[in-house]
Image (spheres, helix red, strand yellow):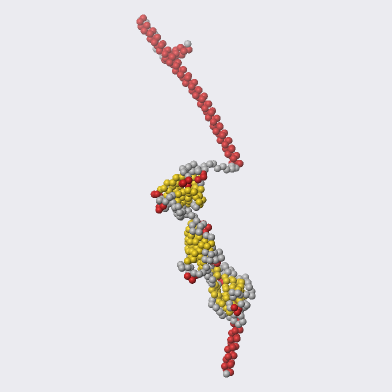
Amino acid sequence: MFLFLQSKAEMWSFQNLLLTICVALRCVISAVGMIHVTGYVGRDANVSCSYDQNYVSHEKYLCKNDCGNSDVLITTSQASKTKYSIYDDTSARIFTTSIFDLQYTDAGKYWCGVMRTGKDIYTEVKLKSVQDSCCDTVTKVQSYEGHSESVSCWYESQYQNSLKYICRGNQPSTCLQQALITSDTKQNARFRLDDDKVLGTFTVNISSLTRNDSGSYLCGVHRSSELDVFSAVELEVEEWCCVKSTKINGTAGHPLTLQCPYPPQHLDNRKFLCKGDHRNNCTDILRSRSRFTLQDDAASSSFTVRVTELEAADAGTYWCGSDSQWRVGNYTKIQLSVDAGHYVGYTVPPLLLLLMCVFAVLVYKCKHQKAKDNETVMNINAQNEDALEEVMRVAENHIYESQEVVIYSNKETAELQNAGNDYEDLGEDEPDLNVTTEEIFCNGNFHIAN
């Protein structure tokens, strides 16, 4: 009996010692299952732990490792620290600890503790730090301004009743707060969300697209106990007339030809050309202006519009195509500018103006001097012509005089020959009749002198 009592006493002593050690070291005994918390690096992470009604007034805390005194990070009696803050919602019987500016080094094992007499109540927490970005796979969607486009997002069957949403950007941590639309609202301006729980997809339709709608989007499925599930979408909104857009320059008063291609299957469609800043508000030029004529070339799957005489008012934006429904790919956008052909005035700097004046004076003087020189040359030529005329006149006179001399010489010769004949009849010797040409000219000159 004594031995039994001694053995029992030793057992109670060991239990008391173990209890004392546990109280001193705040022994970690998990009351519930492990809580998994994942936070984004650079953001805040919240660790929420529930407790029983009996411990509403008890102190709560968050600790790491084995929860020794040095491992306690914050308690409800401290409220807030630089890295941590704690809030106890007694009505919901949940206390939440926030860890600010989460880093990769903050990842690890934590404990939610509820202080009580004897052994505290602990709940194990596993904290994970992840990069605040998404995702490895991106779905690309291409559309055109003015059109409507649908973005489909897939989710797993267990999230049928979860909140769905979509946001712009690539930052999961703030996506829900910046959601463009959620499954609770369903319609928000140009955005509409439809959830097909059978197929496990929700679709977001965006109407009246603009170029500003281009960019990254995240489809989100909210989870209460873990990070939300995301899928990434890259939307590219191209200019409506993405097939062909051209700029043409013409001159007022001149003809101009515009060329518009079309798909071969639109051979029998009505071709058109309209003018306006936007395709939804443009005027059919072919019906309103006779200077514009259309000619279809089926061989090249294009038509041309010829402007007989371009006017300055013709400048602007034109749309030509072969589909009255304005589907993409059946038109061309033409930006036409018209050069009026007039001189465009501008301010001339004073120095340049002075140089121009000096240059003009020099040109005038040069031209004047050249004209004067030409006049002098003309006078000299006139004098030369007069002198030439005088020479010609004198020459003509000499010719006439020579003719008279020849006539006179012939007369003298005839008389001498007659005299010789007379001498023959009388039987007398003939005189010497050899008269030289020089003597004739001398006689001629003598005759003229007389």
Residue found at the far bottom of this picture: 1
Residue 63: x, y in percent? 59, 76
Q: Is residue 354 left or right of residue 417?
A: right
Residue 404 drawn at (x, y percent): 43, 14
What residue do we see at 46% from left, 45% from top? 292
Query: In the rendering, at what x and y percent does residue 426 appear?
Result: 36, 4
The answer to which of 40 and 271 lies nearer the viewer is 271
Residue 311 higher or lower than 235, as above or below: above
- On screen, residue 404 versus residue 223, left or right, reads left
Where is residue 422 shown, x and y percent of the image? 37, 6
Is 358 or 413 nearer to us in this picture?
358
Instruction: Give the quadrant of the N terminus.
Output: bottom right
Q: Tell me what residue is drawn at x 52 percent, y 62 percent.
A: 187
Whether residue 232 is visible: no
Quadrant in the picture for residue 70: bottom right
Can residue 41 be seen?
Answer: yes
Q: Does residue 116 lie above or below 151 as drawn? A: below
Residue drawn at 57 percent across, 68 percent down: 43
Question: What residue is shown at x 40% (from left), y 53% (from top)?
Answer: 265
